[in-house]
Amino acid sequence: MIAHHPGDDLLLSYAAGSLGESWSLAIAAHLALCPVCRDAVAAAEHIGGVLLDETPAETMTAGSLEDLLTRLDEAPVETFEPVAPETAVLPEPLRGYIGGDLDNIPWKSSGGGTYQHLLSTNDLAQARLLLIPEGRPVPEHGHGGRELTLVLSGSFHDQTGSFGRGDMEDADEDLIHTPIAGRGEDCICLAVTDAPLKFTGFVPRIVQRFIKI
Amino acid sequence: MAVALTLNCAPMDGRYPNPASGAILPRAARPGAAPEKANSERNSKDMTEVNQFNALLGKIAETQDKRAFADLFEHFAPRIKSLMLRLGTDPHTADELAQETMLSVWRKSHLFDPAKAAASTWIFAIARNLRIDRFRREKRPELDPNDPALIPAAEPMADDQLEANDQAARVRECLETLPKEQRIAVQLSFVEGLSHQEIADRLDLPLGTVKSRLRLSFSKLRPMLRTES
């Protein structure tokens, strides 16, 4: 069972369409693993539907229906061809960003035995995959802003609790924490930050200048 | 408190000063609206209307019925255009996005599942995504319902499952009973596409107040998805 969920504000913004790409990616990946939040987003989308219904109608440009009717025959009906593999660890839409599953992540060392892979998103936030070897800590750090961490494989724990697959830690700038990967399995997470992480130790700060976390 | 300052996307291009940006109030709250006692009557009318939209979508999916499409267009295209204008889109693009949304409705009609979404909710989501594609040069990350990694919901008892239409009707009722300040926050978020920080600026309120209003309204709306027990 998933114990840690993103804040309602994120689910609402995701449903409204006002959430940037990196955050939306984390939310969508969490939704794949969390039926409870899927229900919540469905509820929020109903708000959009109801408000659409109640919006006073504007006048469409003359002839727009007729134009559209002539285009219908050319419009191919969207067919639905599932190309998904039979099993997967990473949920969509994450696999689409990587072009594959766990084995296809081009990890780069980020020091201290940890690895990362920066994902290409077009908003100001940064989405990255992190690999923390079992039992190892991520250097103690705070955040210049919000940080979402979604566990995809393995687990970690910090001062606020224990996080397994599908759990999302929603941390703000007030949290300074040292996440430690659980034993038995490397921890792979999707992390989204809207400002660079602030490492509190001296050496990690030097490292940070090179690895651009 | 800079937490959410950069959380939401940068302002979209194509911002258009909107002369008619009066808030859209639910019917019950509009001046001169029918008094509360008309509620049940109106809701049953709404339900007929809702079922009618579902039936139109069904006809499009099954027989590529252009007549049904035209009826659906008459209702939704002018409203999608209106929503786009309120979101700051210029009139020409708003018109185009309304047409593109309806074209998408035609192409995807066979994917519409009335058990999972009400027609207006489904069309809202299509319009929302097209707008994101158009303005943000960002992708809209969406889950894939057929993903093998997807963790399915526990199988609900047949009796427990609310029809999507009933859910939408409940959300509608609930929106109408929200205190005014909560409703305005929800509208600014959905209809005007404002980030929480932008809502705070617009209403001249602290960010925390906006967040708590949205949280409160959502906590009232969420249980609407469940059957009363």
Image (tube, rainbow, N blue to C red):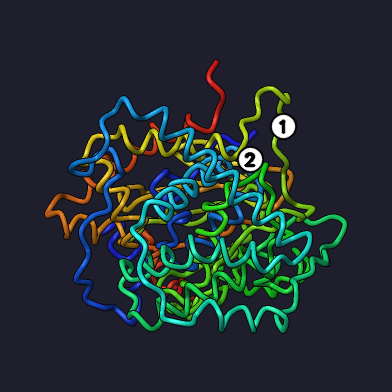
Residue located beneath label 2 in the image: A35
Q: Residue at x 76, y 56 (%)?
A: B147
Q: What amino acid type is highlighted by mark number 2?
A: Pro
**Which of the numbered marks, if any, corresponds to residue B139?**
none
Element type at mark 2: helix
Percent of width and height locating residue B31: 18, 43
Q: What amino acid type is highlighted by mark number 1?
A: Ala
Depth check: give the residue in front, B9 or B126: B126
Element type at mark 1: loop
Percent of width and height locating residue B179: 24, 34
**Which of the numbered marks, if any, corresponds to residue B154?**
1
In the displayed orientation, state which residue is furthest to the top.
B229
- Placement of A50 over or under A55, stated as above or below: above
Parent chain of label 1: B
* Image position of B101 (left or right of A101): left
Residue A67 visible in the current orientation: yes
* Image position of B169 (left or right of A82): left
**Quarter where residue A108 is shown:** bottom right
Could you tell me how many numbered marks the image carries?
A: 2
